[in-house]
Image (cartoon, grey):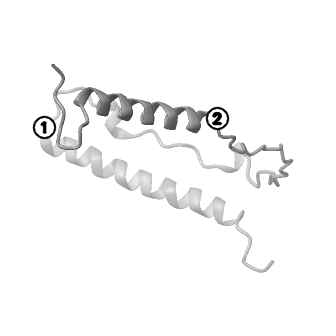
Amino acid sequence: MIRTDQFGLSLQSVLIAVALIILFSILLGCTTVKEVPVYTPVDVTKVVVAPCIEQKDLPAVPVLATTKIKGHEDDCELLNLVLTDRAQLKLYVDQVQGVLAGCVKPAGS
C-alpha cells in the first residue's frame, strides 16, 4: 500500500519529481553557451640597463674570523671573533654601498 499525504501525493512521486527537476536543471546548465575570452599574445618590450659596475670595481669579500673556529674557544674568544667579523662586515658594506652610489642617477636626470 502506498502512503499519501493530505494532498494525495506519495513520497515516491515527490522524490521522482525532485529528481527530474534536478536532472533538467543540470541538463539546461550544460547546454547553455558561455563566451570564453580569447587571449592574444602581446609583445612587451623591457628596457635592460647595462651594469654600471664590474666585478673588479667591487671590494674583496673579507675572510671572516668565525670561519676559523676550531671548537675549543671559550666564550670570550668567540665574542671577540664575532665583534671582529662585525667590524669587517660593516667596512665591507660601506665600501659596496659607496660603489653602488656611483650607479644611482639622481631623480630628474
Disc number at residue 34? none
Residue 20 falls left or right of residue 83: right
Which residue occupies the foreground of this view, 108 or 73?
Answer: 108
Vertical placement of residue 42 versus 69, above or below: below
Exactly how many numbered labels are in the figure? Answer: 2
Tell me if mark 1 has few (under 14), some (14-19) or many (20+) residues whose alpha carbon lies within 10 angstroms of its own.
Answer: few
- Residue at the image position 78 percent from the left and 43 percent from the top: 38
Query: What residue is pinned by disc 1?
Result: 74
Q: Amino acid at mark 2?
A: Thr
Q: Residue furthest bottom?
A: 108
- Residue at the image position 72 percent from the left and 76 percent from the top: 106
Vertical placement of residue 17 versus 62, above or below: above
Residue 95 falls left or right of residue 74: right
Vertical placement of residue 5 versus 104, above or below: above
Distance in Å between CA atoms under marks 2 and 1: 79 Å
Query: What residue is pinned by disc 2?
Result: 31
Q: Quadrant of the N terminus?
A: top left
- Residue at the image position 36 percent from the left and 35 percent from the top: 18
Tell me if mark 2 has few (under 14), some (14-19) or many (20+) residues whose alpha carbon lies within 10 angstroms of its own.
Answer: few
Q: x, y percentage for residue 23? A: 47, 30
Occupied quadrant, residue 34:
top right
Among the two numbered marks 2 and 1 on one chain, the one whose residue lies closer to the N terminus: 2
- Residue at the image position 16 percent from the left and 28 percent from the top: 3
